[in-house]
Image (tube, rainbow, N blue to C red):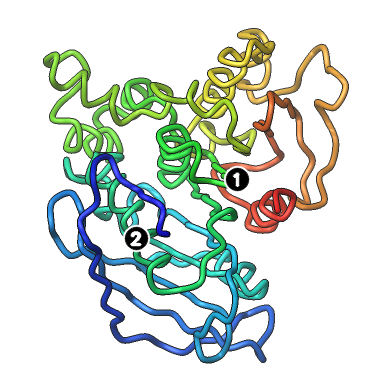
């Protein structure tokens, strides 16, 4: 029985496999990769939407239920974006799904809208309809704008994901707009939300509805890995405060100690914690990086690592494999 994925009642799904290209995994030239562009009907507005699908095996036939990795494009990108995670997922014989969810965040239909959220759910339902998916092992990840959407989807649909991995994501559109007002990103947020914060109650409601911070208390049971590079916000576009505040919402919902304002200030210089707790600092081989803060609350984990505005595919796949 197909699980129901919807804000409301799903209408029957339409899936059309389009043309695909044969590539190879960069890490293993002997392992062919079949990338398909698929279509499915939105159960919310009836439009035909698209996603990239990579299925295991040279023929694209799935012989038994396998995990599904849902990977989300970044803020200004769409389904044509590529990333290193494709190869790591394919080499494990898992299914890789890369939905468009209304493309770059420059229209009201994109940027965590109800339509964009439903597109992700509908794309998953489409794959479950057509392939053997281990529905107990559906994983979610994204970087930057994809991290923003990963955190939001983890909170809005906490029972769907076996684990989720959010990298350098935006947790609060109001504070991110304040940082980037009169820049490209600020203008894109305004195009999505209908104006600047404070313009009207309707505009403010859009900022709230599209911000993961609004819902993250509901992700308190999710195996959610939240990661940010220490230099982001200085050499990148999303300060580490967004990731820390996201984790803190989960910690507070669970009654755990959040990262303190003083600790956030010390790390945001960027710098180093003055008083380091056990486990805060170390080297993670799956990142191949040092980290300067690592905290846990229930199934959630926060890592501030030596880096900038980036995601690390090897650490993402390691997080998934640690939640079989």
Asked whether 126 or 182 is in front, the reply is 126
Position of 286 with respect to 46 (left or right) is right
Mark seen at residue 197: none
> In the rendered view, would you say 160 is above or below 89?
above
x, y percentage for residue 253?
56, 15
Q: Is residue 170 visible?
A: yes
Q: Tag 1, which secondary structure? A: strand
> In the rendered view, would you say 15 is above or below 60?
above
Q: Tag 2, which secondary structure? A: helix
Mark seen at residue 163: 1
Position of 42 with respect to 269 (left or right) is left
x, y percentage for residue 145?
40, 44
Q: Residue at x 25, y 34 (%)?
A: 189
Q: CA distance from mark 1 to mark 2?
A: 18 Å
Position of 2 with respect to 143 (left or right) is left
Find out whether the residues at labels 1 and 2 contact each other: C-beta distance under 8 Å: no
Q: Residue at x 29, y 22 (%)?
A: 208
Crowding at label 2, few (<14), some or many (≥20) Cα neighbours within 10 Å? Answer: many
x, y percentage for residue 96?
50, 67
Q: Where does label 2 land, which residue?
A: 123
Nearer-N-terminus badge (1/2):
2
Crowding at label 1, few (<14), some or many (≥20) Cα neighbours within 10 Å? Answer: many
């Amino acid at each position: 029985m197909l699980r129901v994925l919807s804000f409301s009642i799903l209408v029957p799904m339409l899936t059309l496999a389009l043309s695909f290209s044969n590539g190879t995994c960069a890490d293993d030239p002997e392992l062919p990769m079949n990338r398909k562009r698929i279509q499915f009907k939105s159960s919310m507005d009836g439009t035909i939407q698209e996603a990239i699908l990579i299925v295991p095996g040279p023929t694209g036939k799935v012989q038994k239920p396998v995990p599904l990795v849902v990977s989300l494009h970044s803020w200004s990108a769409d389904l044509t974006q590529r990333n290193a995670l494709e190869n790591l997922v394919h080499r494990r014989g898992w299914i890789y799904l890369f939905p468009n969810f209304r493309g770059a965040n420059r229209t009201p239909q994109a940027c965590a809208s109800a339509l964009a959220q439903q597109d992700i759910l509908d794309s998953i339902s489409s794959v479950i309809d057509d392939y053997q998916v281990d529905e107990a092992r559906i994983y979610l990840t994204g970087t930057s704008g994809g991290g923003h959407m990963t955190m939001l989807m983890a909170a809005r649909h906490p029972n769907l994901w076996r684990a989720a991995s959010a990298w350098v994501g935006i947790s609060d559109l109001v504070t991110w707009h304040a940082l980037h007002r009169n820049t490209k990103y600020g203008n894109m947020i305004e195009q999505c939300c209908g104006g600047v914060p404070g313009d009207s109650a309707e505009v403010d409601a859009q900022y709230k509805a599209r911000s993961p911070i609004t819902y993250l208390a509901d992700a308190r049971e999710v195996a959610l890995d939240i990661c940010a590079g220490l230099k982001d916000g200085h050499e990148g576009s999303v300060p580490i405060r967004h990731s820390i505040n996201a984790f803190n919402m989960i910690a507070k919902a669970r009654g755990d100690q959040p990262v303190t304002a003083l600790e956030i200030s010390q790390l945001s210089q960027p710098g180093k914690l003055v008083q380091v707790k056990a486990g805060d600092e170390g080297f993670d081989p799956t990142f191949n990086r040092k980290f300067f803060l690592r905290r846990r609350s229930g199934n959630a984990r926060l890592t501030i690592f030596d880096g900038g505005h980036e995601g690390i595919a090897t650490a993402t796949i390691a997080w998934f494999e640690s939640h079989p």
